[in-house]
Amino acid sequence: MTRVPARLQLLNLLRWFREYSISWGLLSVIYSVTATMILQPLLEQAFQREIHFAPLWFLTCATLLVPGVIESIGFPPVPWLVRRGKFKELPVFMRTYLRHEFRRGSTWIAVLGVVIGGMMLPDGLRALWIMILLLPSQRALYSVHRWRRIAQGFLPSNGGVALVDAFTVSQLVQFLVAWGAFVLSGVLPLELAWKYGVAGGCAVIAASSVALEGDSGRPWLVNFFSLAVAVLAGYLVLAFPAVALAVLYFRHAARSTLGSRLKSVEHLDEDSLVP
Amino acid sequence: MKTLSFHNFNIGRKAHKLLLRLDAQAWGPGLHVIVAPNGYGKTTLLQTIAGALPPLQGEVKVDGAKLDPERDVLYVSEYLTFPKFIYPSEWIEFMSGGQSSKDESEWIRAFRLEDRMGEYVGRLSQGERRKVTWIGAHVSPKPILLLDEPLDGLDLLAIRSAREMVADWKRRGRCVGVVAHQVGEVLDLADEVWLIKDQKLVAWNDVMPQSFVDSGPEIFRKSVLEFYTVTDTNLVTK
């Protein structure tokens, strides 16, 4: 195999940086800092202690990279979980999405991570579970741009709605599995289980409702945006359960703008498989 | 039987300095082949008709009514994006909009895919994936098919099956737009050949002295080369 000379590799790297450093780098910093700024007072209030900004920002960025790693590792599929031709009663786009998503090893590794992560949390830091349970949605966002191409190609008018609906249903199923296992583990007292269930569900709905945001049509920006929205929704509902109604309203309102979001990516062509 | 008509339909991409104007052309039932050099807007044209890209101006009508891409048009990209862990039958079902087709299994046999239906799409070769999209296009209920380089990666036997499929579509009155560089494989089936010149879509018979059907693949190829050798102003330079 011909090896690309180091000089060309370096040139490619520099040109990649020149092309994307502003759009990806700057906006990523803005989103991550925003997410951290939202997170900091909420966590300080939850844990009744001062949390420094810099380590929290680092933690936020690192957390955003973990799902990308899970998504990029080719875990073996779990074909026995979803047999061929399942979900016939669902809309055609949703059934295709769910069959694929539920057969993937990465999907269930992330769910397992949520359960184990939750069980490892000490009592005083239990509220962090709301953040951990965003792992599956953050993982799925790393490949949503490829589904976006499929939706754009085959369902140009309603593909945005179809994709976000499928994404939301998939994420809610994964959340229910993780939450059920978490509750059954006995770590979470039963009186808190419902509170965390509602807050977690709202966080997942909020995270899913912005799955088509980020004009580049690539992961990273959409991950930051989704994390910020979900953390805000999750912790606000945890503190004030009535905010759940506002989350549902905003989800409904966001749905009506999805048609135009689908077309914000100009380049359709990419010879690739959804991982 | 559907006829597409273009009304002051301008398409383009600023990033590619591309502009293409269509007005008063019509694509009736049958096979329409678009031939033009790379970067002249063939793919952009198909994607804009299919509603995946917004037009700069104007509209497309189907039988005089506004085109609804989601209801009327199936666009199959040159580049195939598949979910890795989906079976071919499930992808065909997706392309069919969930409707079943009587002759699906016949075409699966014709394309020699029957032994591969139990594999995930991600484990098929590029050519086999292309075959899956052909069968998906066949079972699609949409009357207008736009295929971008649909012959890429197909072996000779599969090309024969694809030609039979196109002939079947023509009998059913489907309107099929194809962008293909391997024009010789479908030239005898074509009802019209379209060329792109000076940012306009022009019918072969309006600019060429000889019918593309009578010319045969070799003369056709030479005619196209001569046609595009003359400098034209297709690319927007300002």
Image (cartoon, coloured by chain):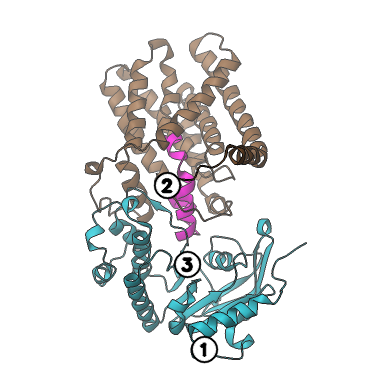
Q: Residue at x 25, y 58 (%)?
A: B116
Find residue B82 and report its horizontal and vertical position in percent: 39, 53
Q: Earlier in the sequence, mark 1 or mark 3?
A: 3
- Amino acid type at mark 1: Ser
Callout 1 crowding tier (Cα within 10 Å): few <14, some 14–19, many ≥20:
some
Q: Quadrant location of the C terminus of chain A?
A: top left
Mark 3 crowdedness (10 Å alpha carbons): few <14, some 14-19, many ≥20: some
- In the rendered view, tell whether residue A226 sits above or below residue A45: below
Q: Nearer the viewer, residue A270 or B168?
A: A270
Residue assigned mark 2? A165
Residue bearing mark 3: B149
Q: Which chain does tag 3 point to? A: B
Query: In this structure image, what is the colour of chain B?
Result: cyan
Tag 3 secondary structure:
loop
Q: Nearer the viewer, residue B129 or B135?
A: B129
* Chain that appears brown: A
Whether tag 1 and tag 3 are in contact, CB under 8 A, the answer is no
The quadrant of the image that shows the N terminus of chain A is top left
Q: Secondary structure at mark 1?
A: helix
Residue contact at pointers 1 and 2, CB within 8 angstroms: no
Start-end of magenta stretch:
A137-165
| Residue A143 on the magenta span | yes
Residue at x 55%, y 35% (from the top left corner): A225
